[in-house]
Amino acid sequence: MRGTGVPSFRRTALAGAVLATALGGGAILVACGAGGQDGAADGPARLSVADSYIPLPPAGGMAAGYLTVRNDGGQDQLVKVSSPAAQSVTMHRSTASTMEQVERLDVPAHGALQLARGGTHLMIMGWQKTPALGDELELDLTFARTGTISVKVPVKELTYRPGQQ
């Protein structure tokens, strides 16, 4: 009789321990996941664009585009840039010796993504019409979480630097 009661008790205790561990582990996973790896804990991204400009390109040639995306909310990523006035707009990162195209750029939570000379920038190719000083090019910035924001970017003289006039 003792032989049948003890194993039954052990099985019940073991099953209870396994269940408690599984439920406890699930609670830990839920607690760890609540913060979100994608910045969701900070809520949605709240984006604005400032200091945008395009230095006047040579007649009909490629142009660079610069701007700052400010973020007062959760993390996001710039995943695509297009324009109805150009055949293509690509994102690039410059280093001391190379320039490489990138597929996406991080917009940090409560921070900024800065596209500036000598660093990360846009390359604009295949203009519909040759740009002139004072023209504005529409850029459609598409973000992973926020969606698309359209901005008008002025064409400035080649030597223009925001904040220096």
Image: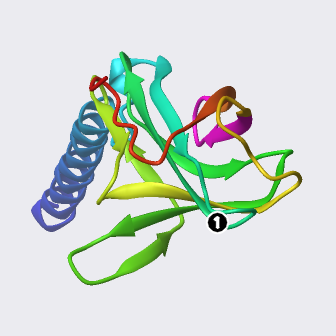
> Which residue is at 72% across, 41% downward?
132
Q: Dot 1 lies on which element?
A: loop
> Which residue is at 27% across, 26% downward?
164
Task: In the rendered view, tell whether residue 118 sits above or below residue 43.
Answer: below
Q: Is residue 131 left or right of residue 20?
A: right
Image x and y of residue 138, in percent: 74, 34
> Which residue is at 24% across, 50% downward?
12
Image x and y of residue 142, in percent: 65, 41
Q: Quadrant of residue 5?
A: bottom left
> What colouring method underlies this structural image?
rainbow
Residue range highlighted in magenta? 137-146
> Which residue is at 61% across, 57% downward?
57
Q: Is residue 118 left or right of residue 2?
A: right
Foreground of the two, 162 or 50: 162
Could you tell me which quadrant the C terminus lies in?
top left
Marks counted in the figure total: 1
Residue 135 in view? yes
Residue 36 in view? no
Is residue 143 covered in magenta?
yes
Q: Amino acid at mark 1?
A: Met
Residue that carries the numbered disc 1 in the rendered image: 62
Foreground of the two, 85 or 155: 155
Is residue 101 covered in magenta?
no
Foreground of the two, 42 or 144: 144
Q: Quadrant of residue 8?
A: bottom left
Task: In the rendered view, tell whether residue 150 sits above or below residue 65.
Answer: above
Image x and y of residue 89, in percent: 67, 58
* Neighbour tally class for label 1: few under 14, some 14-19, many 20 plus, Cα within 10 Å: some
Could you tell me which quadrant the N terminus lies in?
bottom left
Q: Quadrant of residue 137?
A: top right
Q: Is residue 27 left or right of residue 81?
A: left
Task: In the rendered view, tell whether residue 81 sits above or below residue 155.
Answer: below
